[in-house]
Image: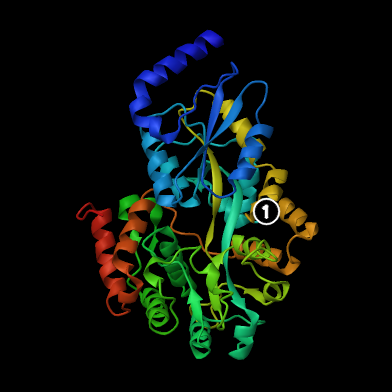
């Protein structure tokens, strides 16, 4: 084993050092055991480090390698490695939208056996995984990753702001109502509208909430049907146009998940409504009593509700995100890598991610433990769970990166979105990109 491992290290150093050194390659450890490299996104890294140690065995060690912050940059780094058939990419955290692309390219090891059966049952709502999370790891009727944590967006708000505006938050609210309420009180509505993946998340949720899709028949690949030039697309564009005109924050065109957090509790003023992910509650709870933090009364003023409706009376489609764990198709230790992936995605690991990092589970059993912990309000936990199960996924396509890039290109900046032209222009451009007639 030692001799073979030493040969592997030397050959790796010669053949791929120039390509991969910048990524922090740690293919060979000093303990005499093989090392499984686990590429992780920056969320929940402390928990990932703990589980890399806990899930290491007498046969192998797991080492954490940090990916870039943005989902698109994460995809780029992993795709380059896998396209080069890099054997040191053993485990990887994947944004759900990249599972189809990687599976279609042959870059992921198929998940089989009892775990695949459980995922397949869960897609239909009869298994332990949340159906929204289970659906993200399937492609071409097979399973190619394991759900780790499932993300979704809620409408977060200052209760005092909603009350002053006369908005009944016990009932579903629309984007129009939220924007009008914020504008009436001198408040704002926080969104993610920088030119990056989260802007695509917002556009997709708005369109699905109006009963439409950006694309359909995605199994046809480049021949998928482009549907964004539709009544649903125009209604989505009208929401963005109205927000930009009436209740936008000053940084709308570069707004990201973290930029609107401080608007909830300004020293003066009414605060905001905000669509954002599950980490928000843990973020604010952790600020209570901290220097320059918030008070218990301010935390009590934090409200949450289901994602706003695009069209009144039509249930919203909250975004579905999170992280799935994939095993690289070229790993030299695929069986060990799958064993490690099962350990990393265990029920307890999911509970720890929720309690320590605010990243919510992908399984119902872990959700039950989080609800019983008392660390979150129970109604909030259930809203997280139902939002994942009843939410709307982004297009599942092997060409998703092209689809997302094309939409971002034509819908950004949000201040220029026009219901009469943006859906039509973006549909034409997306068709051209998919057909190879235009470049991103």
Q: Nearer the viewer, residue 225 or 413?
A: 413
Relative to 133, is 17 on the left or the right? left
Relative to 404, is 211 on the left or the right? right
Is disc 1 surrounded by few (<14), some (14 to 19) or many (20+) residues within 10 Å?
many
Q: Does residue 32 appear anywhere in the picture?
A: yes
Give the residue at mark 1. Answer: 354
**Quadrant position of residue 265:** bottom right
Relative to 390, is 71 on the left or the right? left
Q: Position of residue 273 (x, y in %)?
A: 55, 77
Residue at x 38% of width, y 53% of height? 400
Quadrant the N terminus occupies: top right
Quadrant the C terminus occupies: bottom left
Colouring method of the image: rainbow
* Residue 329 vertical placement versus 293 (above, below): above
**Quadrant position of residue 330:** top left
Q: Position of residue 79 (x, y in %)?
A: 39, 40
Residue at x 62% of width, y 54% of height? 359
Residue at x 64% of width, y 21% of height? 59
């Amino acid at each position: 084993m030692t001799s073979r491992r030493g040969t592997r290290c030397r050959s790796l150093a010669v053949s791929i050092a120039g390509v991969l050194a910048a990524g922090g390659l740690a293919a060979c450890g000093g303990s005499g055991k093989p090392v499984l490299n686990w590429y992780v996104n920056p969320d929940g890294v402390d928990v990932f480090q703990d589980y890399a140690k806990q899930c290491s065995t007498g046969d192998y060690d797991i080492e954490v390698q940090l990916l870039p912050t943005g989902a698109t940059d994460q995809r780029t780094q992993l795709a380059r490695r896998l396209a080069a058939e890099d054997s040191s990419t053993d485990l990887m955290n994947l944004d759900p939208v990249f599972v189809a692309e990687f599976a279609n390219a042959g870059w992921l090891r198929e998940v089989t056996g009892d775990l695949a059966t459980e995922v397949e049952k869960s897609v239909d709502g009869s298994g332990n995984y949340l159906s929204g999370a289970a659906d993200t790891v399937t492609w071409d009727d097979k399973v190619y990753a394991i759900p780790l944590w499932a993300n979704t967006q809620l409408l977060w708000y200052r209760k005092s702001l909603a009350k002053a505006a006369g908005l009944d938050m016990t009932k579903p609210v629309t984007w129009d109502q939220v924007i009008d309420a914020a504008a009436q009180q001198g408040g704002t509505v926080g969104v993610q509208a920088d030119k990056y993946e989260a802007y695509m998340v917002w556009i997709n949720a708005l369109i699905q909430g109006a009963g439409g899709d950006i694309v359909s028949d995605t199994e046809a690949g480049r021949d998928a049907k482009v549907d964004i030039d539709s009544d649903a697309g125009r209604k989505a564009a009208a929401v963005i146009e109205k927000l930009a005109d009436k209740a936008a924050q000053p940084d709308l065109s570069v707004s990201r998940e973290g930029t609107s957090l401080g608007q909830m509790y300004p020293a003066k003023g009414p605060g905001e409504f905000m669509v954002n992910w599950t980490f928000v509650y843990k973020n604010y709870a952790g600020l209570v009593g901290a220097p320059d933090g918030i008070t218990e009364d301010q935390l009590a003023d934090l409200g949450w509700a289901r994602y706003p409706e695009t069209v009144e009376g039509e249930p919203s489609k909250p975004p579905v995100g999170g992280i799935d764990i994939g095993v690289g198709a070229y790993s030299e230790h695929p069986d060990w890598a799958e064993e490690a992936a099962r350990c990393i995605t265990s029920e307890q690991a999911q509970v720890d991610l929720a309690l320590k990092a605010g990243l919510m589970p992908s399984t119902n059993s872990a959700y039950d433990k989080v609800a019983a912990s008392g660390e979150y309000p129970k109604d909030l936990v259930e809203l997280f769970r139902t939002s994942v199960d009843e939410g709307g996924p982004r297009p599942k396509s092997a060409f998703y990166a092209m689809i997302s890039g094309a939409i971002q290109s034509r819908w950004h900046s949000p201040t220029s979105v026009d219901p009469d032209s943006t859906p039509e222009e973006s549909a034409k451009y997306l068709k051209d990109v998919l057909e190879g007639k235009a470049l991103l």
